[in-house]
Image (tube, grey):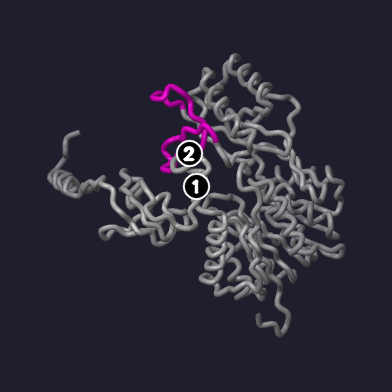
Amino acid sequence: MPVADGLSIHRATWLMGRSRKRLPDTPFELDIGSLDPKGAGLAEHEGKKLKVSDALAGEKVLARYLFGRHNRGKAETLEVLQPSADRVLPRCPHFGICSACNLQHLSMDAQLARKETALLRSLENTGQLYPASVYAPLSGPLWNYRRKARLSVRDVAAKGRVLVGFRERDGRFVADMGECHILRTEIADALPDLSKLIESLDCRAAIPQIEVACGDQKSALIIRHLEELSVADVERLRSFAQQSGLGIFLQPGGPESIHLLAPEDLHLEYTIEALGLRFQFEPLDFIQVNGGLNQLMIARALELLDPQPEDRILDLFCGLGNFTLPLASRAGHVCGVEGSQAMVERGRSNAKLNGLDNVKFHAADLYQSCQKAPWPTLDFNKVLLDPPRSGALELLPWIAASGVSRVLYISCNPETLARDAALLVNQYGFSINGAGIINMFPHTPHSEAIAMFERKVDGDTK
């Protein structure tokens, strides 16, 4: 297309003059100062601040620049010249390529300490909060713990095969995974065969993703397909389900289109062993990723909230009742509130499944006014909050006005926890009795947290 005028010619010339000078690909040494929130090493080279993959604080490494517009200001570690005392040998051969767990080279003690420090610093910086007690980190299974995941699928012509796995670090490619040490064993072991299965399908190029959902006894794959499956493809999938023991769900459209292909009687379920509670769920329902840690998290929630027969407890963002039903097994009455009507129905059926009749579930948008809903008028003395990453800011005024004496806050985002904690303590008359981390995703930078708040009594200045 020809340039239209002198101004365009001038701009084109200016842009050519602005083209970035190519960085040298010669390796250079770096001293790593610290880690950023995503686990990359931070360093400086020739006046440039760099994020360095696979490097740890205190190390000297040999590195080189990463190229491409997605990698500006980034470098990769070629060799560790002076290792940190916290460095360990990564377990997975795909470490450094796959994006799923980028802290495998950091010892577990150091991972936990890093996450705890980040939580306490966030509480201090956001609201000058210093918990009266720092809870011991909650940490469960460290390997093969992941019972929910989304795997990408890519038909790669250059390799002549289909790749099934997590994304590579820069997000543009699918990692070529022969094994995985964080997925549940039955899924990890099936990856090579799953790749071959998709290769065998007529619609191999029309499958963008496969979701994983694992119960205690049975596991399932939810296969998203962008075109109608042939009769032969359906039979291949049925055969794979029979041979692998994995359930197969198909998803031709949105979430509402998901339906079971094989076997005919598949039911997904997990239990809370200490309480003898069973939870049935659908493949795309939210459940805690780390099943073993979920057991410990519920035990700690019961310990801290201390439900008694005279208590009336409100569980906000209750999902399918993961905390609601354990609380109901000890408290006088529990009310669970959740935005999804489908999850509310799941909670009700799980309460019935477990013979609990002292629990009610309500569907409500918890980010909108709840004054006209039936549950805010009930007399609760304790609250459990388990909000999404955005936190529970909109609910804090109601909680403060309700007269509840104790609030247990379980968070998948310590930053919004710190924000909400600052308001509960500094504006709404609560004290923060304790806080600690939940290691839901070992070998990743992601951290979750739990905090207990109690309403101050007259004369209490803590």
Q: Position of residue 33 (x, y in %)?
A: 39, 62
- Which residue is at the front of the view, 151 or 110? 110
Q: Dot 2 lies on which element?
A: loop
Quadrant showing the C terminus: bottom right
Q: Is residue 256 above or below residue 357?
A: above
In the drawing, does residue 162 fall left or right of residue 404? Answer: left
Q: Position of residue 162 (x, y in %)?
A: 48, 26
105 is within the stretch colored magenta: no
Q: Residue at x 29, y 57 (%)?
A: 45
Q: Which residues are magenta?
A: 155-179
Q: Which residue is mark 2?
A: 94
Residue at position x 41%, y 61% in the image? 58
Marks 2 and 1 in Cβ contact (< 8 Å): no
Q: Residue 278: which quarter of the image?
A: top right
Query: Which residue position is annotated with label 1?
Result: 89
Quarter occupied by residue 413: bottom right
Mark 1 packing: few (<14 Cα in 10 Å), some, or many (20+)?
few
User: In terms of depth relative to the viewer, which is nearer, 329 or 303?
Assistant: 303
Q: Nearer the viewer, mark 2 or mark 1?
A: 1
Q: Toward the viewer: 78 or 224? A: 78
Residue 364 percent coordinates (x, y): 69, 53
Mark 2 and mark 1: Cα distance apart in space: 12 Å
Which residue occupies 16% across, 48% down?
Answer: 17
Please tell me in which quadrant of the rendered image residue 255 appears: top right
Residue flagged by tag 2: what amino acid is it? His
Q: Amino acid at mark 1?
A: Leu
Q: Is residue 297 left or right of residue 48?
A: right
Q: Is residue 368 visible?
A: no
